[in-house]
């Protein structure tokens, strides 16, 4: 800083002119007028960058600018073809290839604990696999960031599983607990990018632009990883030439074996084409693995073999048993069966080594399989040699024979407990559903899950609608069944006994049907009739763990005629009880002399127990043949019963 001439204490000796001459000379000759930033004071210092001088302040600002967007570095290209330049670039002396540039980005100090690598707009090529550390995400710009694989049967990217599981304490002598029981903490993502196999056709050993990933997936994921893939277009390649056994890109996404903690894969809003199989999710750890596929569009080709090796190799998704959710996906199987055999969307190919108590939910699947007889297959397939009898919820699918697949709804009595959460709620919820069925021709079967509570039933409607409804009760903590208080109007259809009749589906479980004057004012017995086909084709009727209080279980065809001998009827663990609250004497059970009738572990108390056979107007019809009727482990307590000949059927026909 300029050293001003001060002079003496006397004003005339250190005058104004002398001082300014010193300043002028210092400025004119340079001197100490040129000074460094560390000699310039901040007055005052900045709150955000608190340094006493300019030098320190600028250093703080530079550090802030360099660290701005920490966890985010970019990869570009310094070529002369319009590529954007990023933090790391292909085409430089230190990172001449895209692979070297992106690996350098992974090693950036700002990505030590994970972060995002942004692939700037442009087209890049890979010929060797890029290993992606756990916690690293790769992001591009939609439709403008393109990575072309020119591989030799190795994946373009391999996402590595996390090896760092934080501890959360709780050491009781055997060591601290690991965080998030069985699930990885670090998540990697791949989004807003296009991956293509030999897009420009530069690689072709046969002189043709061939697929370069014939036996490996484009993206490989280690088991026990957590990976999210969104807005990615997977463009495989189908070799030119004869269709039979032609080569094509193996898969878009595949898994390695190993890893004993849960694997999590979410695939959302992605596009697949030119592939044998879209996704193979096979970590093999059962109920701790989770797969979600949402809003994807795909066309898959399958093996295109003379004899397909398996359903799994000719589907959109092949998986080991896991918790699986697939919603609103559009899938096309290329070509015509049997040359192309893509006849299922989602195949559970193996059980794996984990637990089997999983949840499978598939909804809103549209598209079509390979044309031809393959249409007999469904959107979800349990592969041969794999698991069977899986519990799955299929809803609103329109794919192959899953047109209008069975779906379910939930009802509740409308209280403030947990049972109050449902699709339909209130004491009249069942009536509302029956009215909705009558309003239109209900084409598809429905399972109604009924939470505990009491529901008044006043809506009988026509059998042609109600027979689509199967009811399953969800008993409360005290094992109380949902109660259907029957109060049908006098204009309702009736059964052979004159009971006001409610016709339902083929499955009734955990429901208490009750005719009670005290509760509803009704004075009539009611009949509960499961769906009996009345044809030579078998109907499987299952009534389990239900209570029929002053109600008759009437397994009778809707018009009293038709052939009912081919039915398969199982009535297990039910209670039939009658009391003096109604004047009439009722009957617990009416069942035809069908091909197979099982009455097992049931109890009857009061009134007539029932009839299995034919009598009077109750005639199953059709030519007689041998029936198998099994009555076992039942209790029939008639001590309080008053029998009369009031019944339309002869007294001696009942047991």
Image (cartoon, rainbow, N blue to C red):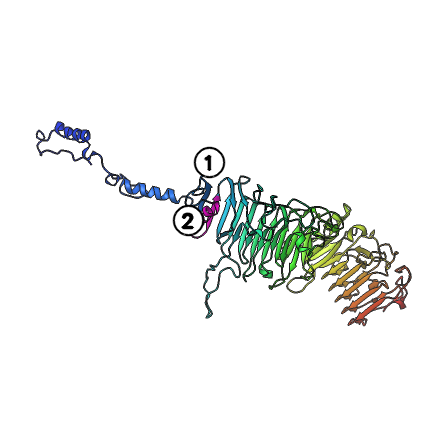
Identity of the residue furthest to the top in this view: 17
Residue drawn at x 10%, y 33% as measured from the top left: 7
Q: Is there any visible trace of residue 414 in the rendered image?
A: no
546 over 420 or under it: above or below: below
* Residue assigned mark 1: 80
Residue drawn at x 41%, y 49% as measured from the top left: 110
Task: Measuring from the top left, give residue 75's x and y in whole percent.
Answer: 46, 43
Crowdedness of circle 2 by 10 Å Cα count: few (<14), some, many (20+)?
Answer: some
17 over 171 or under it: above or below: above
Circle 2 or circle 1, nearest the eye: 1
> Is 458 left, or right, of 654 in this rendering?
left
Q: Secondary structure at mark 1?
A: loop
Question: Magenta span has 103?
Answer: yes
> Gap in Å between the C-alphas at discs 2 and 1?
26 Å
Q: Quadrant of the C terminus?
A: bottom right
* Residue assigned mark 2: 108
Magenta-drawn segment? 97-118
Task: Measuring from the top left, give residue 316's x and y in whole percent.
Answer: 65, 50
Which of the two residues, 616 or 531, is positioned nearer the viewer here? 531
Question: Magenta span has 406?
Answer: no
């Amino acid at each position: 800083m300029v050293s001003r001439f001060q002079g003496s204490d006397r004003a005339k000796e250190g005058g104004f002119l002398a001082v300014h001459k010193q300043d002028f000379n210092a400025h004119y000759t340079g001197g100490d007028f040129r000074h460094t930033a560390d000699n310039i004071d901040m007055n005052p210092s900045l709150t955000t960058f608190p340094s006493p001088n300019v030098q320190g302040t600028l250093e703080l600002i530079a550090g802030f600018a360099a660290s701005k967007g920490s966890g985010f570095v970019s990869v570009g290209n310094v070529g002369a073809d319009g590529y954007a330049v990023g933090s790391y670039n292909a085409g430089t002396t230190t990172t001449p290839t895209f692979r070297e540039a992106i690996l350098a980005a992974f090693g950036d100090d700002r990505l030590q604990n994970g972060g995002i690598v942004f692939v700037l707009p442009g087209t890049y090529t890979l010929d060797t696999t890029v290993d992606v550390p756990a916690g690293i995400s790769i992001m591009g710009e939609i439709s403008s960031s393109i990575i072309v694989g020119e591989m030799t049967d190795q994946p373009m990217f391999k996402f590595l599983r996390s090896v760092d599981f934080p501890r959360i304490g709780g050491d009781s002598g055997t060591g601290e607990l690991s965080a998030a029981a069985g699930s990885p903490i670090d998540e990697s993502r791949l989004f807003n990018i296009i991956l293509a196999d030999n897009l420009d056709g530069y690689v072709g050993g046969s002189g043709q632009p061939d697929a370069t990933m014939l036996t490996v997936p484009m993206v490989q994921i280690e088991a026990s990883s957590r990976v999210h893939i969104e807005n990615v277009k997977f463009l495989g390649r189908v070799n030119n030439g004869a269709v039979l056994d032609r080569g094509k890109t193996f898969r878009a996404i595949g898994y390695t074996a190993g890893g004993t903690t849960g694997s999590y894969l979410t695939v959302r809003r992605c596009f697949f084409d030119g592939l044998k199989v879209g996704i193979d999710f096979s970590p093999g750890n059962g109920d701790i693995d989770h797969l979600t596929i949402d809003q994807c569009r795909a066309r898959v080709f399958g093996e295109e073999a003379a004899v397909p090796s398996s359903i799994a190799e000719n589907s959109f998704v092949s998986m080991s048993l896991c918790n699986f959710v697939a919603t609103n996906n559009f899938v096309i199987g290329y070509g015509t069966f049997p040359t192309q055999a893509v006849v299922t969307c989602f195949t559970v190919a193996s059980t794996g080594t984990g637990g089997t108590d999983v949840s499978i939910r598939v909804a809103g699947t549209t598209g079509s399989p390979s044309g031809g007889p393959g249409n007999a297959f469904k959107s979800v397939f349990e592969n041969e040699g794999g698991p069977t009898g899986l519990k799955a919820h299929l809803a609103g699918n329109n794919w192959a024979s899953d047109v209008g697949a069975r779906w379910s709804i939930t009802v509740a009595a409308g209280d403030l407990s947990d049972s109050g959460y449902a699709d339909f709620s209130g004491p009249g919820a069942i009536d509302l559903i029956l009215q909705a069925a009558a309003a239109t021709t209900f084409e598809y079967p429905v399972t109604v899950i009924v939470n505990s509570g009491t529901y008044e039933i006043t809506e009988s409607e026509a059998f042609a609608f109600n027979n689509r409804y199967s009811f399953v009760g969800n008993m409360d903590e005290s094992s109380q069944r949902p109660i259907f208080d029957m109060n049908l109007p006098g204009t309702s259809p009736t059964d052979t006994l004159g009971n006001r009749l409610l016709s339902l589906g083929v499955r009734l479980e955990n429901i208490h049907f009750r005719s009670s004057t005290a509760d509803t004012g009704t004075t009539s017995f009611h009949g509960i009739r499961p769906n009996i086909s009345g044809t030579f084709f078998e109907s499987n009727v299952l009534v389990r763990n239900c209570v029929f209080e002053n109600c008759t279980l009437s397994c009778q065809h809707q018009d009293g005629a038709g052939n009912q001998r081919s039915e398969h009827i199982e009535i297990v663990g039910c209670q039939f009880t009658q009391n003096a609250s109604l004047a009439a004497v009722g009957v617990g059970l009416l069942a035809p002399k069908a091909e197979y009738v099982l009455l097992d572990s049931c109890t009857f108390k009061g009134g007539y127990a029932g009839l299995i056979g034919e009598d009077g107007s109750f005639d199953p019809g059709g030519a007689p043949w041998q029936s198998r009727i099994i009555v076992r482990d039942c209790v029939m307590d008639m001590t309080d019963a008053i029998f009369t000949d009031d019944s339309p059927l002869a007294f001696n026909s009942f047991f």
